[in-house]
Image (tube, rainbow, N blue to C red):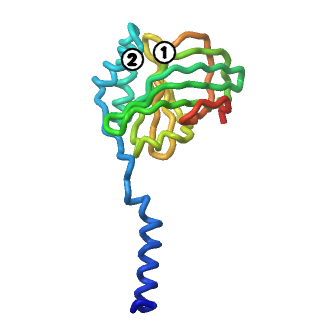
Amino acid sequence: MSGLTRRELAFGAGSALGLAVAGPAFARSDPAPERFSTGELVDNGHKFFGTVSRGLAQAVEEAGRRWGQPNGYILGQEASGAIVGGVRYGEGVMYTRNAGDQRIYWQGPSIGFDVGGDGDRTMMLVYNLPATRGIFSRFGGVDGSAYFVGGFGFTALTDRSVVVVPIRSGVGARLGINLSYLKFTTQSTWNPF
């Protein structure tokens, strides 16, 4: 057996197994995105949303006050409708400073006292994103929402320590309150669950 003792073989096999199990925890091929300043977000939002920018600045500043600086953001469009139960579908691009940009889709169900429909341009601020693949999960609603002048409103959705704050401006008629989640995917799907 080429001069190796059982003890050396056992130690080598145990070390290889330990590295195989622990390897993904130590190897980081997808770096955590760097943070964006409030000014950068407002400037990019102005370009995306157009003229209704005062409400955007207020929403971004309030989100920054609550959660700090995001390390990613999504610009996109979405549509939703509800009669007690509802659905939301959207698509856009997630921007990060040092981990690249990525096409992204989202969909999700809702239930509550809710009726109407809307189409929105959406900016989603993403906080505590450990790596770009961390967005591909389900993010559930948390208590509280705020609405600002200019038709902008935001709420917070969480999954573990990652917080996604959608800021929406659009057209439509919608009234109510609901519980919901958004599921982010790499491909479009009609299945909201």
Secondary structure category for the residue under label 2: helix
Q: Could you tell me if the residues under marks 2 and 1 are in contact, i.e. CB atoms within 8 Å?
A: yes
Question: Which quadrant: the N terminus?
Answer: bottom left
Q: What's the residue type where badge 1 is placed? A: Ser
Q: What's the residue type where badge 2 is placed? A: Leu
Residue 116: give x, y in percent of width and height: 66, 15
* Residue positioned most to the top: 51
* Sequence order check, earlier mark of 2 and 1: 2
Residue 169: give x, y in percent of width and height: 48, 15
* Residue at image location 36% in from the left, 14% down from the top: 47
Residue 188's quadrant in the figure?
top right
Question: Which quadrant: the C terminus?
Answer: top right
Left or right of residue 83: residue 89: left
The relative height of residue 100 versus residue 119 in the rendered view (above or below) is below
The residue carrying mark 2 is: 56
The residue carrying mark 1 is: 169
* Residue at image location 31% in from the left, 19% down from the top: 43
Question: Which of 113/139 is in front?
Answer: 139
* Residue at image location 43% in from the left, 10% down from the top: 150
